[in-house]
Amino acid sequence: MTRPADGRPLSVKEWRLNLYLSEHDPDTTARIVLDTGDNVLESCAEARRSPYDSAVPEIGDELAAGRALIALGRDLLRAAAGDIEAVGAPEATPPAPLWSPRE
């Protein structure tokens, strides 16, 4: 086990993330369930293929999963901000946005 310079063991946690994809052409839905051991967070997102595009299921999977992961990231940041506020500690700097305004 790797140890910090002061010799104490590192704290190790495992969070379980399940990603479920369902396809109903032309729609793909991604559902993510994150179990931290203390809390469970869930996010969902969709992708829709244009009727003018070729059917490439992997693209719908990637878009839906990526969007669901971004949504989960926002939820985690909101949860952290709420926890920071709850313990009375001011947040030093606002977090950088995870996405551009066009997304």
Image (tube, rainbow, N blue to C red):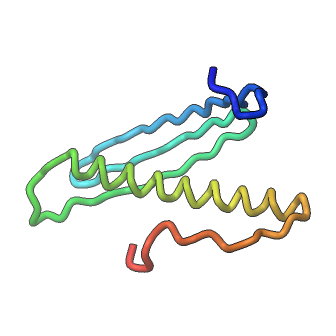
- Of residues 1 and 5, the one drawn nearer to the viewer in this rendering: 5
Q: Residue furthest right?
A: 88
Q: Is residue 71 left or right of residue 56?
A: right
- Of residues 74 and 1, the one drawn nearer to the viewer in this rendering: 1
Give x and y (percent) for residue 6.
Answer: 78, 33
Q: Is residue 3 left or right of residue 43?
A: right
Q: Quadrant of the C terminus?
A: bottom left
Give x and y (percent) for residue 34.
Answer: 58, 40
Q: Is residue 17 left or right of residue 5?
A: left
- Of residues 79 and 23, the one drawn nearer to the viewer in this rendering: 79
Question: In this figure, what is the number of numbered marks?
Answer: 0
Q: Residue at x 45, y 69 (%)?
A: 99
Give x and y (percent) for residue 101.
Answer: 44, 79
Q: Residue at x 45, y 53 (%)?
A: 68
- Of residues 20 and 2, the one drawn nearer to the viewer in this rendering: 2
Rendering quarter of residue 100:
bottom left
Q: Residue furthest top?
A: 1
Q: Residue at x 38, y 53 (%)?
A: 66
Rendering quarter of residue 95:
bottom right
Q: Is residue 96 left or right of residue 40?
A: left
Give x and y (percent) for residue 50.
Answer: 18, 65
Q: Quadrant of the N terminus?
A: top right
Q: Residue furthest bottom?
A: 101
Q: Residue at x 22, y 51 (%)?
A: 59
